[in-house]
Each structure stands twice: as structure tokens, then as C-alpha cells.
């Protein structure tokens, strides 16, 4: 089942399959589209800290047996670049009678031997009840899809308002996505190459002493901490020929700002080396920061956002 965009796909799934007496269990760093989809549903939303399986089990254990339960996670978390703990999530789902939905927008095309995403990476494709993905990442097009058992899809076709009352994907985007799928199936070496490029950058950041997140996917967050410093570094890198995405509060907590860097299979080693040279210049010469300054930024009075912030 396809939708005009990935954002609309998550709205369409959760607003249709989650009923009034159902409960959704969300990783606190799930994508904003999942949060908005949960808001459109009539179900109850419970959040647990990022990849905290003890908290997830506590929430599942307290949930009445007669309630429908859906564990909803990003396969690859879009800011952190790390993976959902799918082995433990599927184990807990089986233990407590829950279903599992995975938004694998950033995993499909980059993980697994054939690029089928986090499910293939862990060998747990058959344990995912609802798989969501987009065509705007590895497929270089636009739109989103929703895969599940036939009866789930047919139910959603007749109840999903974001699906029923929206136009379909443009034909050109459909053709582009189909061709990208053919390329992915015929050239699995691209999946290997994108992982090699990401690991090359992680090693480079470590060598240069540039603080970054412990990612697995070809998304590497680089720590900048302060919002103002983040924007200054973003502009400095752009002036030196490197584009990055700044991520500041409220998308992250204050004092936890990052640069979201991402990599493709077509990046060359020369390009990656050039990027590392500019990171070294900007981080270590133009905008150096001490451990004491980092600690002050992370522990200051504004380090935490309000609890009702939907992004946290």
C-alpha cells in the first residue's frame, strides 16, 4: 500500500490500525511523523527511553492482557544513526502478546545483505508485523509504503483517511522508485559500499578527535552541543564546501545539538577525505571546545526541555 509521502504513510497506518482500546509503545526518539500518527489515532501512547528494554518491558507488563498492543520503532533512528534493539523488541512482543511496527525509512537500501533493512540485518524479517518505508531516501524519489499481512492492508485501505482522501504518487515518482528497486536488487554491492563509506568517516572522526555518535547506519551525528555554535559551524563548513544538516532544540534537548551527516554509496574516498579535512579545520582550529565547556552546556539550567515536548 503506497502513500504520497513517508510522513503521510505513518499518519495513515497508525490512525487506521490503532483503535480506541489499543496501546502504542514508542521509543522516545521515534520520528515526528509517528508521533503525529499516534495523535490521530484513538489509542493510548506510552513512551520509553531510547532503546531502554527494561522500561519497555515494565510498560508491557502493566498493560492489561485484553488491550491491543503495538510496539512502534524506527529501524534506524534518523538523528542518532543507531538501530532499534529489534532482537529484544520482538522477544518482548512475543512474551506479552504485542505486535511490532518498524519505520525502516533509513534502513532499507543501507542494511542487510540485500539492503532489505534492519529486519534482514538482524535476521528477523518474519517477526515484523508492519513494515513502513519511504521512497525519498535510498530510492531517490518521493512517497511511502506500508507492508503487512493482506487482511491488515485491506482493513487500512478502507479506514485510512490519509490514504482515501489523498492523491496517489505521481507516475514519474513511481517509475523512479521502481527503477531504484531494480538497481538495488541487481547491484547489492552498493549496500556494502555505503556501509564502508560510513565506517571510513567514523574512523576519520575518531582519528581527528571530533565527537560523534556511535551509529551503525550511514547517518553519523557529530556533536556540537550549543545551538548557536551549531549554526556557526554549519555555515563555516558550507563556506569550505561541505553541507551538513544542523539539528537544534527542540528537535533535541538543549545542550545536545548535533550536525546530522549522511553518506551515499557514490561518495568517493577523495570526497570523504576532503570533508574530513574541513571538519578538522572547523572543529579543531576555528571552533575548538574544551571538556569543561561541553559539561557546562550539557548540565546548564536549560539542558532539559519540558516533558510535554513531542520531540523528546
Image (cartoon, helix red, strand yellow):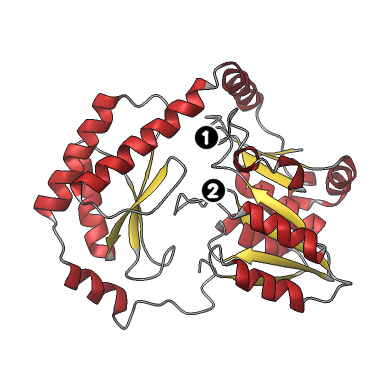
Q: Residues within 10 Å of mark 2 (few under 14, many from 20)?
A: many
**Residue sitting at x 65%, y 29%:** 170
Residue 282 placement (x, y as % from top left) = 15, 48
> Can the viewer see residue 47?
no
Of the pair 294 and 230, the residue shown nearer to us: 294
Residue at 55% from the left image edge and 22% from the top image edge: 188
Q: Provide the secondary structure element on which disc 2 rests.
A: loop
Label 2 and label 1: CA atoms lie apart by 10 Å
- The answer to whether 87 appears left or right of 225 in the picture is right
Report the residue at 30% width, 73% height from top.
298
For the view shown, which residue lies furthest in the top direction?
186
Q: Callout 1 environment at 10 Å: few (<14), some (14 to 19), or many (20+)?
A: many
Q: Residue at x 73, y 51 (%)?
A: 12
Image vertical order of residue 269 relative to residue 244, above or below: above
Which residue is labeled 1 in the image?
110
Is disc 2 in contact with disc 1, using a CB cutoff of under 8 Å?
A: yes
Q: Is residue 54 left or right of residue 269?
A: right
Amino acid at each position: 500500500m503506497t502513500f504520497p509521502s513517508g510522513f503521510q504513510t505513518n499518519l495513515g497506518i497508525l490512525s487506521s490500525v490503532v483503535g480506541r482500546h489499543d496501546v502504542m509503545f514508542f521509543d522516545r526518539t521515534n520520528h515526528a511523523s509517528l508521533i503525529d500518527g499516534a495523535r490521530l489515532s484513538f489509542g493510548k501512547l506510552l513512551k520509553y527511553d531510547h532503546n531502554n528494554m527494561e522500561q519497555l518491558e515494565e510498560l508491557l507488563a502493566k498493560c492489561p492482557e485484553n488491550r491491543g498492543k503495538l510496539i512502534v520503532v524506527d529501524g534506524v533512528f534518523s538523528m542518532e544513526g543507531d538501530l532499534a534493539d529489534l532482537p529484544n523488541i520482538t522477544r518482548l512482543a512475543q512474551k506479552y502478546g504485542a505486535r511490532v511496527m518498524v519505520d525502516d525509512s533509513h534502513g532499507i537500501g543501507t542494511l542487510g545483505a540485500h539492503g532489505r533493512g534492519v529486519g534482514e540485518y538482524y535476521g528477523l524479517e518474519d517477526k515484523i508485523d508492519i513494515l513502513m518505508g519511504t521512497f525519498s531516501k535510498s530510492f531517490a524519489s518521493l512517497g511511502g509504503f506500508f507492508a503487512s499481512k493482506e487482511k491488515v492492508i485491506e482493513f487500512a485501505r478502507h479506514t485510512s483517511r490519509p490514504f482515501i482522501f489523498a492523491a496517489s504518487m505521481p507516475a514519474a515518482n513511481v517509475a523512479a522508485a521502481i527503477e531504484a528497486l531494480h538497481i538495488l536488487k541487481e547491484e547489492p554491492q552498493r549496500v556494502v559500499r555505503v556501509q564502508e563509506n560510513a565506517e571510513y568517516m567514523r574512523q576519520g572522526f575518531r582519528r581527528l578527535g571530533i565527537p560523534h555518535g556511535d551509529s551503525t547506519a550511514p547517518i553519523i551525528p557529530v556533536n556540537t552541543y550549543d545551538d548557536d555554535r551549531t549554526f556557526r559551524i554549519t555555515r563555516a563548513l558550507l563556506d569550505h564546501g561541505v553541507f551538513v544538516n544542523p539539528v537544534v532544540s527542540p528537535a533535541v534537548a538543549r545542550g545536545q545539538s548535533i550536525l546530522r551527516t549522511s553518506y551515499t554509496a557514490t561518495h568517493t574516498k577523495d570526497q570523504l577525505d576532503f570533508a574530513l579535512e574541513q571538519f578538522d579545520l572547523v572543529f579543531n582550529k576555528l571552533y575548538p571546545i574544551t571538556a569543561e565547556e561541553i559539561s557546562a552546556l550539557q548540565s546548564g539550567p536549560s539542558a532539559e526541555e519540558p516533558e510535554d515536548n513531542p520531540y523528546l
